[in-house]
Image: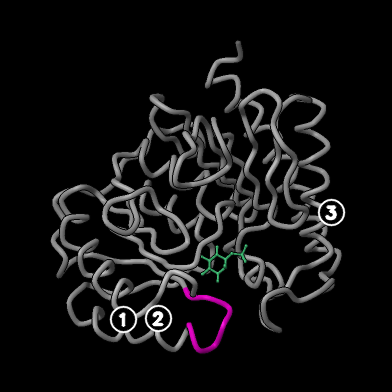
Amino acid sequence: MTSHAELLEIATTVARRAAAFALQRRRDGVEIAASKSSLSDIVTRADRETEQLIRDALAAARPRDGFLGEESGGDTSQSGLTWVVDPIDGTVNYFYGIPAWAVSIAVVEGDPEPSTWRALAGAVVNPVAREAYTAYVGGGAHLNGAEIHVNEGVGLSLALVGTGFGYDAEVRRRQATFVQELIGDVRDIRRIGAASLDLCSVAAGRLDGYFERGLNPWDHAAGALIAQEAGARVAGIEGCPADRRLLVAAAPDLFEHLHPRAERFYAERFDDGQ
Ligand code: LIP
């Protein structure tokens, strides 16, 4: 039986290799391979090549495990474990050369569904910043091997809060109305552009809180575990596990004030299909 620490070692080793590859491809020049849900929702050749590198490395190390990747879909697990992968989270930042993108690799137990899975280990590697965030369940969270912890005792009015927006212009317009509502009640808002780095920023105390609607499983699988192991509460609508409808992450005291605001807005203004 492979330990959680051994699973994390695999995730971290593969994420570092993939991040180095993606960084070199960035330096070589980035080409858009296609657009997905909208013209602004791009996928680069490097996204696809990096995911294939990750897929091949994980298949060699753990041939019976399942795989769920942003670019190449899924393979059913025979072992009960599935690797959930975003090869380049923050694709638009990557395309523009903004140094806020990361390789995100998590391994989960059970179906690859955020509402039911149990995340066991996760690694988020930002090669430009030379930063590797890691966690396995019960092992705490680390940044480059040093333990990290969320900021506690921060009230809403002094909270630095991250968020993000969807690729659909109409959805973005409505999401922005919540930011307009909230921005006067918090210290400030940050839009980093990569959910995995938003969640790791909460874990490291670089953000006090984060919320977003419309995330895919691979966007938050690793970052949410890292934030939880750093002391954050991470949840969605009605306190259920985070999913596409909503993810809120913050230290428990701030969460009690931030989550109801986000939940009320998103439950009232969006139906589940959007
Ligand atoms: C991104 C997320 C980010 C969100 C962006 C985009 P991608 O993922 O990490 O939080 O605001 O719109 O979805 O597409 O770069 O993998």
Question: Within 8 Å of ligand 1, the CB of disc 1?
Answer: no
Q: Is mark 3 on a helix, strand or loop?
A: helix
Residue at point 32%, 59% (across, down): 237
- Whether tag 1 and tag 2 are in contact, CB under 8 A, the answer is yes
Please state which of residues 177 and 188 is positioned toward the viewer in this rendering. Answer: 177
What residue would you read off at disc 2?
175
Residue 34 occupies quadrant: bottom right
Q: Position of residue 90 (x, y in %)?
A: 61, 64
Gap in angstroms between the C-alphas marked 1 and 2: 6 Å
Q: What residue type is labelled 2?
A: Gln
What residue would you read off at disc 1?
178
Task: Check disc 3: other Cα within 10 Å, few if <14, some if 14-19, many if 20+.
Answer: some
Q: Which of marks 2 and 3 is nearer the N terminus?
A: 3
Q: What residue type is labelled 3?
A: Glu
Please state which of residues 83 and 198 is positioned toward the viewer in this rendering. Answer: 83
Q: Where is residue 145 in the image (x, y as percent from the top left)?
A: 49, 31
Q: Position of residue 8 (x, y in %)?
A: 57, 28
Relative to 205, say whether 228 is above or below: above
Q: Which amino acid does label 1 sit on?
A: Phe
Residue at point 63%, 70% (across, down): 93
Which mark is on residue 211?
none
What residue would you read off at disc 3?
49
- Nearer to us of marks 2 and 3 is 2
Of all residues, the one furthest to the top in this rendering is: 1
Q: Give the range drawn in magenta.
A: 165-171
